[in-house]
Image (cartoon, rainbow, N blue to C red):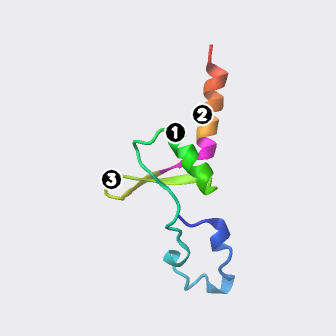
Amino acid sequence: MCLLDDVSQVPRDAWDHTLVGEVLRDDLPTGRPSWTLRDALVAMDEADIDRVAVTDAAGTFVGEVRSAEIIGLDEILDDTET
């Protein structure tokens, strides 16, 4: 993933020749489709990020999970409980 904090460290005049791979973070957690929502939230909290990339067993990107979406879902479910 590329984080805004990391990208903002690249001088604007270097954007035309700076490769994404130069600012890409490979030390962040990667989720799996089999993770629970709690697993994803814990991983995000521990890494101090608000989203986690999800990959399959071969390491192919399949999507992302965002903490705001999980929290929003929780709020909707709370509001609709009877």
Please identify the residue farthest to the top as the structure is shown: 82
Secondary structure beneath dot 3 equals loop
Membership of 5 in magenta stretch: no
Q: Nearer the viewer, residue 52 or 27?
A: 27
Q: Which mark is residue 37?
A: 1
Gap in angstroms between the C-alphas marked 1 and 2: 11 Å
Q: Residue at x 65, y 66 (%)?
A: 4
Lower position in the chain sequence, tag 3 or tag 1: 1
Q: Residue lying at the far front in this picture: please name it.
A: 46
Badge 3: residue crowd in 10 Å (few <14, some 14–19, many ≥20) = few
Q: Quadrant of the C terminus?
A: top right
**Residue sitting at x 63%, y 28%:** 76
Q: Secondary structure at mark 2?
A: helix
Structural distance between the alpha carbons of marks 2 and 3? 26 Å
Q: Regarding mark 1 in the picture, which secondary structure is present there?
A: helix
Residue located at (62% from left, 18% from top): 81
Q: Are marks 2 and 3 in contact (CB under 8 Å)?
A: no
Residue at the spot of label 3 = 57
Q: Which residues are magenta?
A: 64-69
User: Sequence-wise, which precedes: disc 2 or disc 3?
Assistant: 3
Which class describes the residues within 10 Å of circle 2: few (<14), some (14-19), or many (20+)?
A: few
Circle nearer the N terminus (1, 2): 1
Residue 22 point in image, percent of width and height? 53, 78
Q: Which residue is identified by label 2?
A: 73
